[in-house]
Amino acid sequence: LTVLREEIETIFTSLGFEILQGPEVEDDYHNFEALNMPPEHPARDMQDTLYLDGSIPTASDRPATLLRTHTSGIQIRYMETHEPPVRIIAPGLVYRRDNPDVTHSPMFQQVEGLLVGENVTMADLKGTLECFLRLLFDPDTQVMFRPSFFPYTEPSAEVFISCVFCKGSGCSVCKKTGWLEILGSGMVHPAVFDAVGYDSERFTGWAFGVGIDRVAMLKYRVEDNRSFYDNDLRLLEQFSY
């Protein structure tokens, strides 16, 4: 996971992005509300949030405190103190209420990216992600964008790559489709810009999020997500660092 994270950071550094770190213990505002997810928004249910110290989303006497469910809060904090243009990625651990199994973990690593400026379009997003995924996997990797929904982007798209196991011909891993979902992305919602004081009539931007554990399973053909955290030397010694 560390090797892959640094490879991703190297790719985006070469594209002119700055790497940021932020708090893993976050407040409700930066993790949800500033990202166009008010207290009763149904998207919060998708996050399976781990709240701390008895905090609840509707608490009125003090802000709810939680383990961050994504690294998007870093983007909000950065935009609050920096004017566009913005070109950043935010890697780090995130936490969700989930039972460990072959593909899930209550703690995993994620990288989120953000680019904001004047005249930024969906074409810029597609070009950047296609470049990133082909550098990460294979120059011949096919990339597909499919419309989706995320509260902090509009329009939004799920991104798929041609199956790394069958090269798109169809197999049990890709359920005979030839495609594997790899990340979520989209154009930043104007409400997010309003929350940080950006002029949404002047500036546009795009964002994406990708799970490092998920990518590592595909890239290194690891069948069980839990293997990354078992500290089994038979696995670890296969990776030079």
Image (tube, rainbow, N blue to C red):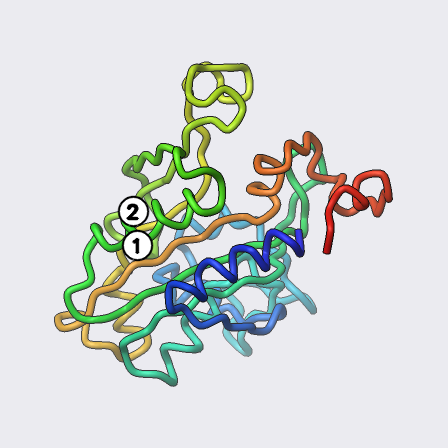
Which quarter of the image is occupied by the C terminus?
bottom right
Q: Residue at x 41, y 56 (%)?
A: 40
Front residue of this view, candidates 100 and 27: 100
Front residue of this view, candidates 171 and 208: 171
Q: Residue at x 52, y 61 (%)?
A: 9
Q: Secondary structure at mark 1?
A: strand
Tell me the crowding category of disc 2: few under 14, some 14 to 19, or many 20 or more residues within 10 angstroms, Cα based.
many
Quote the CA–CA distance across marks 1 and 2. Answer: 6 Å
Residue 95 location, x and y as percent? 63, 55
Residue 6 location, x and y as percent? 59, 59
- Mark 2: amino acid: Ser
Q: Residue at x 62, y 63 (%)?
A: 67
User: Viewed as shown, does residue 228 lie left or right of 22?
Assistant: right
User: Viewed as shown, does residue 169 lie left or right of 149?
Assistant: right
Task: Name above or below for residue 125 compared with residue 157.
Answer: below
- Mark 1: amino acid: Thr
The answer to whether mark 1 and mark 2 are in CB contact below 8 A is yes
Residue 34 location, x and y as percent? 38, 68
Q: Residue at x 58, y 38 (%)?
A: 219
Task: Name above or below for residue 5 compared with residue 90.
Answer: above
Task: Tell me, for residue 133, which label it has, or none.
Answer: none
Q: Secondary structure at mark 2?
A: strand
User: Viewed as shown, does residue 51 lie left or right of 116?
Assistant: right
Task: Name above or below for residue 102 compared with residue 69.
Answer: above
Q: Classify residue 134 by image quadrant.
A: top left
Please name the residue that numbered disc 1 is placed on: 153
Front residue of this view, candidates 114 and 193: 114
Residue furthest to the right in view is: 233
Task: Tell me, for residue 156, which label it has, or none.
Answer: 2
Residue 233 location, x and y as percent? 86, 44
